[in-house]
Amino acid sequence: MVDITPEKIENVGPAEVPEADLYHAHSWWTKYVFSQDAKVIAVQYGCTAVAIGLVGLVLSWLMRLQLGFPESFSFISPESYLQFVTMHGMIMVIYLLTALFLGGFGNYLIPLMVGARDMVFPYVNMLSYWIYLVAVLVLCSSFFVTGGPTGAGWTLYPPQAILSGTPGGTGWGIILMLVSLSLFIVGFTMGGLNYVVTILQGRTRGMTLMRMPLTIWGIFTATVLALLAFPALFVSAIMMTLDSVLGTSFFMPAIVEFGEQLSYGGGSPILFQHLFWFFGHPEVYIVALPAFGIVSDLLSIHARRHIFGYRMMVWAIVGIGALSFVVWAHHMYVSGMNPYFGFFFATTTLIIAVPTALKVYNWTLTLWRGDIHLTIPMLFAIAFIITFVNGGITGLFLGNVVVDVPLSDTMFVVAHFHMVMGVAPILVVFGAIYHWFPLMSGRMLNDAMGRFHFWVTFVGAYLIYFPMHYLGFVGVPRRYWSVDDTSFIPDSAADLNAFITVAALIVGFAQVVFIYNIIVSVFKGKPAGQNPWKATTLEWQTETVPPGHGNFSKELPVVYRWAYSFSVPGTKDDYVPQNIHPDDVKLVSSESNA
Amino acid sequence: MGFFSDIRTKPWLESQVEIDNAHTGGSIGLPKEKLALRVFVGVVGVVFSLSVVAYSDRMALADWNPVPEPLIMWLNLIVLLGGSLAMQWAVINTRRDKMANVEVGLLVGGALALAFLVGQLLVVRQLDALGYFAPTNPALAFLYMLSALHAIHLIGGLYVWGRTVLRIWRGFEDQKIYYSVELCAFYWHFLLALWIFLFIWFVIT
């Protein structure tokens, strides 16, 4: 590889954005509430996602209490347990992770990292958040209606999802869930259009596609995936709503319920499964790809080394995105599909592991001979690699039909997907918050509390999910309120469940410390300074930290190099920001070299 | 350069640094509004594609009972086609800088879209009169669902169309109006193409 020791080049002229292109708030309400500034919208998305995420966390505690100490909590009935399972799953996947990565980090980082003043359509961007908020409120309202929220499982499979035997199946529970999802998708589409067009058309001078940080590549590809995958959920939500409300039979077969023949007839539950997973599997990567991008940047910055194999990393992100649309039916091996069909999807599932493994190798090689700083973002980034490899490998197990069939609907599956798309992305979220909190607030998070948070979360995650794999192996099923005295389940499973519950409660407590740290640090944290991590990317090169309205000074920055100029031979500092003109780079003088 | 040639470049090479420094931002030769509309149309296309896939999957089941297309659906198709042609005429007149003709084309295009929506309601009434209103008939359910989805997108287009008309009446700058007219026309053409596809699909199934 050729090094990029800077040399004199012709200057690129300054770029200014006319005042008319930037919305200026005229009141407190339009500045902080109905704001069109992507940074404010990002914080709104972030706060809402974390708030609903905490609801999801509490629901998981309730589930764990029931599993760990059955018959101890009279308020957790079999029906409410299923409702907790359903709401926890949907909240965490859609309303927390998707919203936080794309709505939160996407809004904050895209304009800043590509050198734009704001998103290209700020008004539509604002609408996107408010529709998301309404979707969250509609979802929450289902806790308060007669019959409560739906307990159909987050996959909402018909026919059970809209039958009276399922909690919330015939009342408002399922309808509110479907309406909320539809609203979420409408809101996301508005935001997604902004992200894609801003990245493609709103970049500053010199910022070619291949000079973009991998964070932006991850968010961009995930947004494209979401724009193409969410319509599948949208269509299935509409069709199921019609089945539930108007009595159509898109998905509902002829069925007898409690001895009564229902008016449905001929519908296809499998059709719903195909539509759901055509959305559902790309959804894994909608969450994972931004995490991949962010972790790449965290590793590079905190190891003071350029990302290894940048081009391959970009191709892998795009390749994984494309392949994610041809693996969906590996979630349906037990649906009675043709074995050849299963073979095809097992093969594509193995193929998608290739670019994914390539990324893991490149992350590891980025660390190789790096000047590794074990900062908190770095700890979380390394922890991500470990947990992601764990979750990914169990995914390869489950991607094979013969292994998946006996493990299907066991705790092994729960452990797998929690490791790969629960723990791993959440660790990236934490790493990203520790990394960019100084930019957003101008203050550092408390280091001691951060390290406590990291170790309890990381070790605790293993204490929760490693034993869960074993529970799956011995046949403990998922979504069961109680396995009682099932003969094939050993007594030790109950002890292990109790242990997991205690671990989950402790990990939950660590999250309270994290939130306390954020609240305290916003007001009393150590001042961060201009660029505390000595990063090269544009978000740290703003006139003020936190960045002001319009992000940059009168002129937009001009980019002269890629985002990974760390430890460049011949330069005085171990990093060269993207916007520093080659003439202004501090070089090591020939005398000091001698 | 195109997207795929862009992502083959090596940004760390000195030779590439010089090329990249001359980059002026942006990857696609389209204004942001036109690009956004194309992306949106792509998303809408996916919604309808998946619906049609679901339709064809559902058709294979035993209870499928085809629904006749009332004559008024053919008339509606012609009305929508007229709306699209009127919009295109408005676009042609933007290039000739004839504001009066642009206004006429825009108004006719919008009026015909409204007429189409009314016509679609008449289709529902006619099918009802023929005894085709049972929601358990999947062919009918798909016909209503796809027609309603198409109508909702057309209503969204009419909202933007209404704003454009208001801007004309308020005397906004001609060039900005022309730009909005182009976007409206593109959307009208898309919805026409979509409806032609759906209509043919209904007829052959």
Image (cartoon, rainbow, N blue to C red):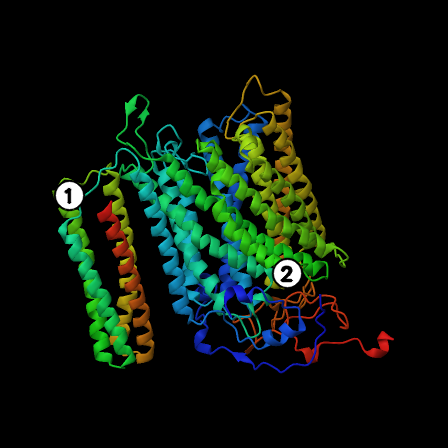
Residue A143: image tag? none
Left or right? Give the position of A324 relative to B32.
Answer: right
- Residue B72 in picture, x, y percent from top left: 14, 53
Above or below, comparing residue A85 to residue A379 in the picture: above
Task: Identify the residue position indicated by label 1 in the image.
Answer: B128
Residue A310: image tag? 2
- Element carrying mark 1: helix
Above or below, comparing residue A251 to residue A355 in the picture: above
- Residue B176 in picture, x, y percent from top left: 34, 76
| Crowd class of label 2 (few under 14; some 14 to 19; many from 20; radius 10 Å) | many
Q: In front: A492, or B56?
A: B56
Q: In front: A6, or A556?
A: A6
Q: Chain of mark 1?
A: B
For the point 52% across and 70% down, which residue is it? A203
Give the spatial CA distance, label 1 vs label 2: 61 Å
Instruction: Tell me the quarter of the image containing the N terminus of chain A.
Output: bottom right
- What amino acid is labelled 2 in the image? Tyr
For the point 36% across and 46% down, which residue is it? A235
Left or right? Give the position of A356 relative to A102.
Answer: right
Q: Confirm whether residue B150 shows in the render.
A: yes
- Element carrying mark 2: helix
| Crowd class of label 1 (few under 14; some 14 to 19; many from 20; radius 10 Å) | few
Q: Residue furthest right?
A: A594
- What amino acid is labelled 1 in the image? Asp
- Residue A487 in picture, x, y percent from top left: 56, 16
Q: Chain of mark 2?
A: A
| Discs 1, 2 touching: Cβ within 8 Å | no
